[in-house]
Amino acid sequence: MSRSRRVLPALPPWLAHALRAQRGPVPWSAVTRGALSAGPLLLVAVQIGRTSLGVVAAIAAMLAGINDRPGSRRVSVKRIGVPALGGALGLVVGTYAGQQTGAVVLTVILTFVGLVAGSISAIGPVASAVGTQLLVASAIGAGMPLPEPGWERALAYVAGAGWLLVLRLVLPTPGSLAGDFRFDGERKAVAGVYDAVAELLDAVGGPEAMRRRAALTAALDHAQDALAGPRLRRYASSSAERRLHAQYAAALPLAEAATALAWAGEAVAERASEGPRRLAAAVRGNSHTGPLPAPSRSAPALRALDDALLHAAEVFDQGRGGDLHTRPRTPRDRLRAAFGSAGREYGLRVALCFGASSAAAQALHQGQWYGQHEHWYWLPATAVFLVKPDLGPLASRVLNRAAGTVLGAVLFAGFAVVLPRPEGLIALVALSGALIPVATRHFAAQTAVVTVLVLALVMVGGEPQASMGRIGETLLACAIVLIVGHLPMPGQRGGGVRARLAAASEAAYAYLTHVLDEADTPRIGTSGTPSEHRAAASEHRVTDRATASGHRTTASERRVIPSDDRATRWTLRREAYRTLAEARTAISLSAHELPALARHTEGADEVADLLERLVDTTTACAVHLDDTGRIGPEHTERLTTLLDELAGPVARVGLRPPGTPLAG
């Protein structure tokens, strides 16, 4: 007799997102850096009698700790250092505006700062972090009276973030002894690409193939970012770094072949994934590859995989460097993002939230709702984190911020009763700094840790215990952001999603156009029967495939693509998949908003699905083209069908098809 199971109702998307937390191993290196940053800085400042500057430096170290994410040391310079400069600027602006102007003018200035910070946040993750610290620091500068002038506070702020950055650059991390410790983040990222290729090959022909393909895109994006961080010289200057660049470049044809196999949907032998796994181990251990198992050469994608393995083995032995296949964003591209539909909508909403919360905070301060203390920065600073869409959907942010603040304030109230001052509070700051890298996995946990840390900081600075006041201000900030977040705005809602979807569409069509040009193929229209494809007038030659890493293959006749064309193709493919992943993230966040907001981007996921299939099909076309010199009829039919299917959904979400030579 079967037992009837009770079916629980599914949670609404906005609530499910609020309860979701990231998983993964504890980042012990980041935990160590967090413990050595804010707490020790505050301790030194107290010992030398500059407590107020120590509070500023510790706040900067705390915000830098939030940006201390996995990656290379070079990327951490940009990820931690650039937002810190924005925070220092905000501290100067807030300090002098708070000292020299009245409440009305100050509110106008802070509203304008919110407009600028919100607009630049649409450029990308680092720019968003700059906007966040610019706003938080301007609120602290205006609402936290300190004896030091603005420039001195700014120097202390830069010193606090700079201290954490120094720890990031100097301290070794697990696994760094396998090679030059300066590039352990890059080595881990490149090895992750080969692991992702192997996992995709294992999943070919199964239900997990598309998810593994998305994971491969994420691994490639992470490795590309890790290797393309800021540098004083244009090119890699050390042999270890050039070797990593070459190993990353060698992974691109492997990723291309694996994607083509996933598109075909036919399972491959288990030995096909052994080669990429051995390459991953060689990168991680900074060692030689050893013999690489050869996959079957029965299909174009399998032949491409075998060729890519042999090429990788040769590259691993030589390590002469390689192109990262990136197209750097120009200042014009950044300005277009900041002043485009996404930047305008984002900037206006941030400005309204930040301005309204600053005005409310000053009104409560003038009415002495705060009691005897003069610090009113908490309300606008809280609104900053609530209004940032890259931190999660609005409803999820509000729920987690409220819950985290209540939990953190209650915990601190208990600590404040039993801990000695200032030694116990400084130890609490150090403990909270160590917990931040773990707490960033869930916004409520991060809010609780940050609340404890900040309340401990300001109490060391001389402010009385104010846990209940912080809870009230947080709830008020939640109400302000919820109201402003649902207000009608000029223009079309969902500008951020549409902007990223438009970028993904343009990149996908550019990639497709380039592959068709490689084949010298008649242009495919969005209707009608496609013409026959003729063979490209490219050079043909017979290449003898000799021994590489102990593996011998037979000679085969293959079409030769000029290296410049292939490099351009890989650059366009990387851009297509990267912009598509960014669009997917934005669509997912929008889908988890409350229904009143989520409805503005309905249908965007359908466009993203079709674009993803289009890019996958284009990749399969490219691999088949390399092998046979022409695009197969199955690829032609699939491309034509996808282009036809895209027309309706693109129009429904308010996008225009890119102006490409595809429509004939």
Image: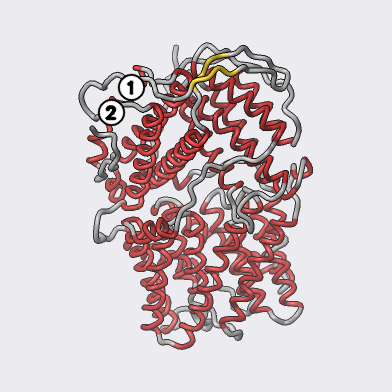
**Residue with the mark numbered 2:** 524
Residue at point 65% right, 55% down? Answer: 435
| Image: 402 above or below 356 | above
Which of the 4 quarters of the picture holds residue 584? top left
| Image: 122 above or below 105 | above
**Residue with the mark numbered 1:** 636
Residue at point 67% right, 27% down? Answer: 313
Q: Quadrant of the C terminus?
A: top left
The chosen color scheme is secondary structure
Q: Earlier in the sequence, mark 2 or mark 1?
A: 2
Residue closest to the eye, 15 or 353: 353
Which of the 4 quarters of the picture holds residue 269? top right
| Image: 381 above or below 77 | below
Residue at point 37% right, 46% down? Answer: 503
Percent position (x, y) of residue 118?
A: 40, 63
Which of the 4 quarters of the picture holds residue 522? top left
Query: Would residue 356 be found to the left or right of residue 527 on screen?
Result: right
